[in-house]
Image (cartoon, helix red, strand yellow):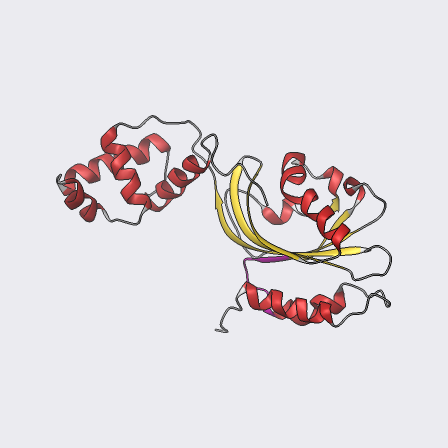
Amino acid sequence: MAKETPFHIVTRSMLDAWLQTSPDQAVTPELVYNDVMDRLSIKMRLTVISISGDDPLGWHMQPVRHSGFVSRILDINSIFAGGPLGEFNDQTYMRDAVIPRLQQVFQTQQPCMELVKTKLFGVSLGYDRILIPQRNTGRPEWIISSSCARFLLSPPRRQQRLDAADEAIVQLLIEGATAKEIAVMLTVSHRTVEHRLDRLKERFEARNTVHLVAMLIAAHLDRPGYGDSHG
C-alpha cells in the first residue's frame, strides 16, 4: 500500500505552484492543485471558493475532492456538498470558523495555514487548513481551501456529574492509561476500576472504552470557556 502523504507536503506543493503564478496573468485554481490531487489522503478535502461581489455570503463553495473519512457522527461530504456560503446549514460555524479567515486571505492575497478548532452542528472538530487565494493585480476570483481532519467528537447527550474517584479514572483514561495501570496508580483493585468503567460506559451510553474516551474528551471540550478562539 502506498505511503500516505503528510498534509504539510501537500500544502508545500500547492504553495510552490502558487508562487510560480503571476499576478499579471490570472490563472485557474487547477494550476495550483492539479499536482496534489493523487496525493490527497482519505482525511483530506479540497474545495474552491468562487468569489463574486463583496459579500462573502454570496461566495460559492464547490468541492473538488471529498474526504474519504466516514463518521457516524456527521456526514461531512453531505454537509459540504457545495453552494453559496450564505446557504450553509450551520451559519454559526460559517461565521466563526470560515468567513473571517476567507476575508483576511481575500484582502491580503496571501495564503494562510492553521489548525482550526471549532464546532459544527454542536460537534467539536479540529482540522489543519490551508487557504490559497488567486494572485491577481485586481481582486482574487477564487480561494482554494484544503483541510486535513484531526478529530471529530460528539459530546454525551446529557452532562454527567462525576465523583472524585470517577474524575481520577477519567483523567488517567484520557491520558492513555489502561485499567490495570489506573488501579496501580489509584491503589485500588483492578476489578474496582473495571466496575467503574462499566458504570461510566452505561451512564455516557458509550459502546466501548474507546467510545467512552472520545465522549469524555468531547465533554471536556464542551465546557464553557474551553477553546473559545476559532480558526
Residue at the far front: name it: 108
Q: Is residue 137 visible?
A: yes
Choose between 219 and 113: the one closer to the eye. 113
The x, y position of residue 218, in whole percent, is 44, 39
- 64 to 55, vertically: above or below: below
Q: Residue at x 20, y 39 (%)?
A: 193
Query: Vertically, is 38 above or below 56?
Result: below
Residue at position x 67%, y 35% from top?
91
Q: Within the magenta stretch, is there residue 127?
A: no
Please give the name of the residue rendered at 62% of the width and 70% of the height, measured from the top-left corner: 38
Q: Nearer the viewer, residue 135 or 216?
A: 135
Give the number of callouts: 0
Q: Considering depth in this image, is 74 or 222 the residue closer to the camera?
A: 222
Position of residue 165 in the picture relative to residue 149 (left or right): left
Residue 84 picture quarter: top right
Q: Residue at x 73, y 46 (%)?
A: 103
Instruction: Please provide percent x and percent y for residue 126.
Output: 52, 48
Q: Is residue 5 above or below residue 173?
A: below
Quadrant where the C terminus sits is: top right
State the image coordinates of residue 176 (x, y, percent, origin top left).
30, 50
Spot occupied by residue 180 in the image (x, y as percentages of width and height): 18, 48
Is residue 66 among what the camera can see?
no
- Tell me, yes or no, whether the highlighted magenta stretch contains residue 42: yes
Magenta residue span: 39-45
47, above or below 186, in the image: below
